[in-house]
């Protein structure tokens, strides 16, 4: 028997977990900026990571009401935006490793 209420709830929880893991990534990417010898590159990468986390959170908060509706609305551009921000996080992570 299919439960139509469970799928949107699982999706909403998945968005929440992704947001929390993005917060951890942003904090780890910003870690080199608090080092005593940090230069402008470290500060820019930390700022980009925090900005990416804020954008990811904003997209998730914008999407949440659509998942709470009686019949969930399609995601539209939210999934593409989430994917692009996730790719940006991967690039930022690569930059942190190269520093």
Image: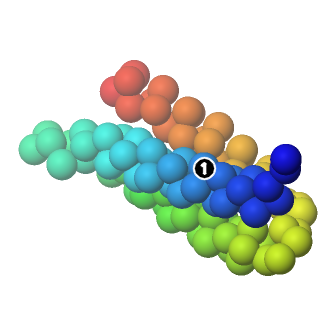
The residue closer to the viewer here, 90 or 9, is 9
Instruction: Reply above or below: 76 against 80.
Output: below
- What residue is at 44 percent from the left and 52 percent from the top? 20
Rendered position, 73 above or below 93:
below
Residue 73, x across and y down, in percent: 88, 69
Residue, far left: 36
Looking at the picture, how far across and down is residue 16, in whole percent? Answer: 54, 57
Viewed as shown, does residue 6 lie left or right of 98?
right
Q: Does residue 51 appear left or right of residue 69 in this picture?
A: left
In the displayed structure, 37 sits above or below 16; it is above
Q: Residues within 10 Å of mark 1 (few under 14, many from 20)?
A: few
Q: Position of residue 31 (x, y in %)?
A: 25, 43
Q: In the image, what residue occupies the spot 56% across and 33% down?
A: 91
Can residue 20 be seen in the rendering of this structure?
Answer: yes
Residue 16 horizontal side relative to residue 86, left or right: left
- The quadrant holding residue 69 is bottom right
Which residue ends up furthest to the front in the rendered image? 1
Specify whether 69 is left or right of 97: right
Q: How many marks?
A: 1
- Looking at the image, which residue is at 32% across and 41% down? 28
Q: Which residue is mark 1?
A: 14
Residue at 72% across, 74% down: 68
What colour-coding does the image apply? rainbow
């Amino acid at each position: 028997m299919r439960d139509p209420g469970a799928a949107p709830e699982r999706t909403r929880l998945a968005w929440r977990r992704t947001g929390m893991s993005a917060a951890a990534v942003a904090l780890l990417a910003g870690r080199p900026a608090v080092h005593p010898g940090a230069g402008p590159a470290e500060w820019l990468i930390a700022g980009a990571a925090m900005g990416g986390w804020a954008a990811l959170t904003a997209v998730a908060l914008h999407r949440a009401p659509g998942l709470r509706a009686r019949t969930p609305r399609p995601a539209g551009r939210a999934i593409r935006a989430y994917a692009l921000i996730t790719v940006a996080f991967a690039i930022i992570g690569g930059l942190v490793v190269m520093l």
